[in-house]
Structures are given as structure tokens and as C-alpha cells.
Amino acid sequence: MNKAVIFDLDGTLWDSAAQIVEAWNDTFASWNVDKRITEAELKSLMGKPMEVIMEHLVPWMQENKRLQLLEECCRAEENRLLKNGGILFTGLEAALKKLKNAGYHLSVVSNCQDGYIQTFIEHHKLQEFFDDFECPGRSKMLKAENICLVMQRNRIDKAVYVGDTQGDLDACRKAGVPFIFAGYGFGSVDDDSNAINSLDELYSMVDKVMSTE
């Protein structure tokens, strides 16, 4: 039986907010956009589709201009993150190694642009751990569909998804996949029965959830 752990990225594996805020605010300034974002505001929006985030930040801007601004912001953040990286949550590499050694297929599915997950993996040299990834910027589908897509193409029989927002939980319900709540992350959920407070707890929670499914 092929078993997988599929991860959200922001608020689950790393905190990239400081680098993204710098990149986006620099881009806004270069566009003469009268808006500056904070880390707290960004974290409250993370997990939503990128177009939704940009619409929230600059609702007065015409859609075609918003999308152009979003494209430039995304390229700027990737350049910064490729150089500087983000902040990996404590215990990440140890948790990934333990899951990998136990035979789990590991993937990342996040509502981001194509290039963002690759930047995370490349800067932090995590290629040995992750077998696959997917995002709307590549597949043109949102999280629930991308969870199913990753499972289908890797012939996964059972999977669990680890995330930190209500949107993650809703996607899991739609995809029919059990959810582990990263309680150390950025968001909250309406069902935290499978919650972990650190990545040190991940392996035992995965084992528990998998054994009850």
C-alpha cells in the first residue's frame, strides 16, 4: 500500500512572511501603489488563492492591473526567497526524515504560484525528502483538486494532509482526505481533533490518523 503525507507550505513547513512583505512592499512602491502590508496582515491571508489575496490588498485596482502587479510581486518574492530563504519550523528536517524512512511518500500542495514551492525546496536543500508538489499556478486547480491530482499520479492509496487554516481543512473534506492541524501555524480551524503543537509530534499523529482510517 502506498501511503502519503501531503503538506501545506506557509504556516506548516516554513514562515516566509518577512521576505514576502519586503518584496511586495518594494514592488508596490515601484508601482506607486498607496498600500503597504504588514506581516500580520499577510499571515491572515495566507492559504487563500493568490488572486484573492491581491484583490483584498488593492480592491480599487482594475483586475488586469492587479494581475500584472501580482505577477511582479510573485517574481520579486521568489528572487528574495531563493537568496535568503524563509524560517523553517523547528524540527522540520527530523520530522521529514522520520516519515521518509518509514516509507511515506511526501508532497507539498499549496495555493501559490508556480515557482514558489520550488524556491522553498531549492534554497533549503530539501530535494531528498519531497517526491512531488502541486499548486494552482501550475495545474490551474485549487487545493482539493490538487490533493487528488497528486494522489492519482503517484498511485497513493491512503494519505493525510497537514495544514494550518480552515481553507486547508475545507479542501481535505472536499478531497476526502483526513486532516492534521498544524496548531503552531498562522490560522485556526473548526475541528482541531487531530492537532499538533510542533513538528516533533507529527510522526505519531500521522501514525494515529493512518491507523484509524
Image (cartoon, grey):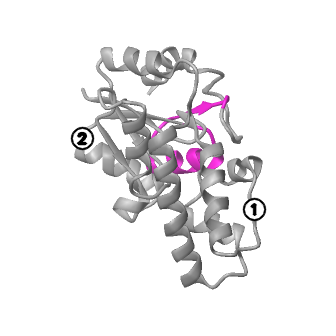
Look at the image and say whether residue 180 sits in the magenta stretch: yes
**Which residue corresponds to the image point at 28% horizontal and 35% vertical from the top-left?**
131
**Which residue corresponds to the image point at 74% horizontal and 58% vertical from the top-left?**
37
**Which residue corresponds to the image point at 27% horizontal and 47% vertical from the top-left?**
152
**Which residue corresponds to the image point at 38% horizontal and 17% vertical from the top-left?**
97
Q: Quadrant of the N terminus?
A: top left
How many residues crowd mark 1 within 10 Å: few (<14), some (14–19), many (20+)?
Answer: some
Residue labelled with disc 1: 36
Question: Spatial distance from mark 2 to mark 1, Cα to Cα?
Answer: 41 Å
Between 186 and 181, the one nearer to me in the picture: 186
Magenta part of the chain: 163-184
User: Can you say whether 136 is above or below 204 in the image?
Assistant: below
Q: Position of residue 108 (x, y in %)?
A: 41, 41
Q: Position of residue 122 (x, y in %)?
A: 36, 38
Number of residue marks: 2
Residue 46 seen: no
Q: Amino acid at mark 2?
A: Asn
Q: Quadrant of the C terminus?
A: top left
Q: Which mark is residue 154?
A: 2
Q: Amino acid at mark 1?
A: Arg
Which residue is situated farthest in the front direction here?
Answer: 30
